[in-house]
Image (tube, rainbow, N blue to C red):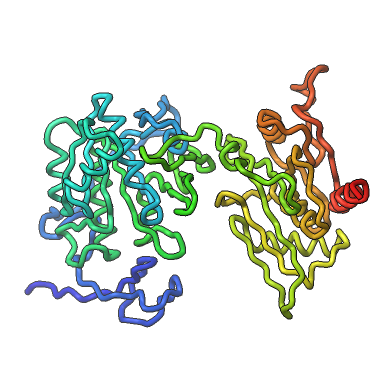
């Protein structure tokens, strides 16, 4: 008698399995995300009937920590910003999950990468589950890449895709656009469900590891910006890359969320144009273009994204409020971080912000996460409240403590050098630490630096500048 398969109830947000239907998932807290699915007991090893039964396990050799270690071979993509994020190129046999909002430029970026590899003689395959071959060709012609020898197909069955790609020389790169449209015969559920996404991803991972082909999976994103599908897929792949940006701005940010073969703090900057995505080797000039130097409430922050220094403009607006609870709005920065800076300015800076609406914006739509932006945000807030513009040739960086002390941050020299290269003449920052073992007698800072140790020094300096101007 055949064993009866019992239905399982799987959350489509986090992949948690429940024994019965529930309105709310206990794992992730999502409402109406649990769907009934009937599938095989395991999606990790293929159909149960085809697996040989073994009484004992297979003995495999064990190795020690000693031995020769070689760096994983990489294939440069031909796009410098993409190679920066991946750690120097595509690692053979790796699988990458690429996510981003609809229309952000994921397919455009992948088309340019596949064309660059194909023009160098590599075998490259682009498998689309959402568009027909003719539609992919139209995009390639619009980008001026119609002559690139890229192999195209419109298919959603994973077994057929793997069988086709296994013919002849293994591809150097295979694009699967997107993983939510793929389905495997080992799973009895609809395409796009958690079980199908997990099973399809596992089959493609086995193909990548056995053939050495780099596979890029394109993933849809949810309303909150997270890659749709089970979180286990992110743990299965070697790298998770996010393509960020605002459709109202002409630049895009490529950021690695996870990378087993490279750094996770590097970013790649692209500019959207009529001819596709253009690399931006110096993004600081792009983010500072068109800034108003004579307006109060703007400060230039000298930040770091991985090993790359980046200068961005932080804008603040402090206005009297007629509401009982003033507004606190922030774009491109952490809301909790803004609340902390406001509390420190009131407690230790002597400012009264309780009856004011506060708006903070990172110009250009860039998302800042490092705490070194505390001093620049505080300077912009004090400038907006006092109505006094900050010096246009000055940059700010420093971490603020709850006591009001300004703490040093890492890579001060790189920040100062980038500011000096763009024409800034001074900086307001914590005391720069100089390594005496590497310093020389003639070592000088790239630009004039005003060291401050407490938030009161910043408030007093802006107030003194106002009195001098009046």
Q: Please state which of residues 320 and 58 is positioned toward the viewer in this rendering.
A: 320
Q: Is residue 82 visible?
A: yes
Image check: 126 left or right of 394?
left
Residue at 21% in and 52% down: 131
Residue 321 quadrant: bottom right
In the rendered image of this protein, does residue 470 appear above or below residue 88?
below
Residue 187 quadrant: bottom left
Q: Please state which of residues 12 and 292 is positioned toward the viewer in this rendering.
A: 292
Residue at 35% in and 66% down: 15
Residue 329 quadrant: bottom right
Q: Position of residue 95 (x, y in %)?
A: 33, 43
In the rendered image of this protein, does residue 319 appear above or below residue 4?
above
Q: Position of residue 226 (x, y in %)?
A: 43, 59
Image check: 332 left or right of 73?
right
Residue at 68% in and 53% down: 315
Q: Position of residue 174 (x, y in %)?
A: 25, 40
Q: Is residue 54 visible?
A: no
Q: Residue furthest left?
A: 1
Residue at 80% in and 48% down: 406
Image check: 207 left or right of 241?
left
Quarter of the image where the N terminus is located: bottom left
Total labels: the figure holds 0
In the rendered image of this protein, does residue 183 appear above or below residue 410?
below
Q: Position of residue 453 (x, y in %)?
A: 85, 46
Q: Please state which of residues 313 and 446 is positioned toward the viewer in this rendering.
A: 313
């Amino acid at each position: 008698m055949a064993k009866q398969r019992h239905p399982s109830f799987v959350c489509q947000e986090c992949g948690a399995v429940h024994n019965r239907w529930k309105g709310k998932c206990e794992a992730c807290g999502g409402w109406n995300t649990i769907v009934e699915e009937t599938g095989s007991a395991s999606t990790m090893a293929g159909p149960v009937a085809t697996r040989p039964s073994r009484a004992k396990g297979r003995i495999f050799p064990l190795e020690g920590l000693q031995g020769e270690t070689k760096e994983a071979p990489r294939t440069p993509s031909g796009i410098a910003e993409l190679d920066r994020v991946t750690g120097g190129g595509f690692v053979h046999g790796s699988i990458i999950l690429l996510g981003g909002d609809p229309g952000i430029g994921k397919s455009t970026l992948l088309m340019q990468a596949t064309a660059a590899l194909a023009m160098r003689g590599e075998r490259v395959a682009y498998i689309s589950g959402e568009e027909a071959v003719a539609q992919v060709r139209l995009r390639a012609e619009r980008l001026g890449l119609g002559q690139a020898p890229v192999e195209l197909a419109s298919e959603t069955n994973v077994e057929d895709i793997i069988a086709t790609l296994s013919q002849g020389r293994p591809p150097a790169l295979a694009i699967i656009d997107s993983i939510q449209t793929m389905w495997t015969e080992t799973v009895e559920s609809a395409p796009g469900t958690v079980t199908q996404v997990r099973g399809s991803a596992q089959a493609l991972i086995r193909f990548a590891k056995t053939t050495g082909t780099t596979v890029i999976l394109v993933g849809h994103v949810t309303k909150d910006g997270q890659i749709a599908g089970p979180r286990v897929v992110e743990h299965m792949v070697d790298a998770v890359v996010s393509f960020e940006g605002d459709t109202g701005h002409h630049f895009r940010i490529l950021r690695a969320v996870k990378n087993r073969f490279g750094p996770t703090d590097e970013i790649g900057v692209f500019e959207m144009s009529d001819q596709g995505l253009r690399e931006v080797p110096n993004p600081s000039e792009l983010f500072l273009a068109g800034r108003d130097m004579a307006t109060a409430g703007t400060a230039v922050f000298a930040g770091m994204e991985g090993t790359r220094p980046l200068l961005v403009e932080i804008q603040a607006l402090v206005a009297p409020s007629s509401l009982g609870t003033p507004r606190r709005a922030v774009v491109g920065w952490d809301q909790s971080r803004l609340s902390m800076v406001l509390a420190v300015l009131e407690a230790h800076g002597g400012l009264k912000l309780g009856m004011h609406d506060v708006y903070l914006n990172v110009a250009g739509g860039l998302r800042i996460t490092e705490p070194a932006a505390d001093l620049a945000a505080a300077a912009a807030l004090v400038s907006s409240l006092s109505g006094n513009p900050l010096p246009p040739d000055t940059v700010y960086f420093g971490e603020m403590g709850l006591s009001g002390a300004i703490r040093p941050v890492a890579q001060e020299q790189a920040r100062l050098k980038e500011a000096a290269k763009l024409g800034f003449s001074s900086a307001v920052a914590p005391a720069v630490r100089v390594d005496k073992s590497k310093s020389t007698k003639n070592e000088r800072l790239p630009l004039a630096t005003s060291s401050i140790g407490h938030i009161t020094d910043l408030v007093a300096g802006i107030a003194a500048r106002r009195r001098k101007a009046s």
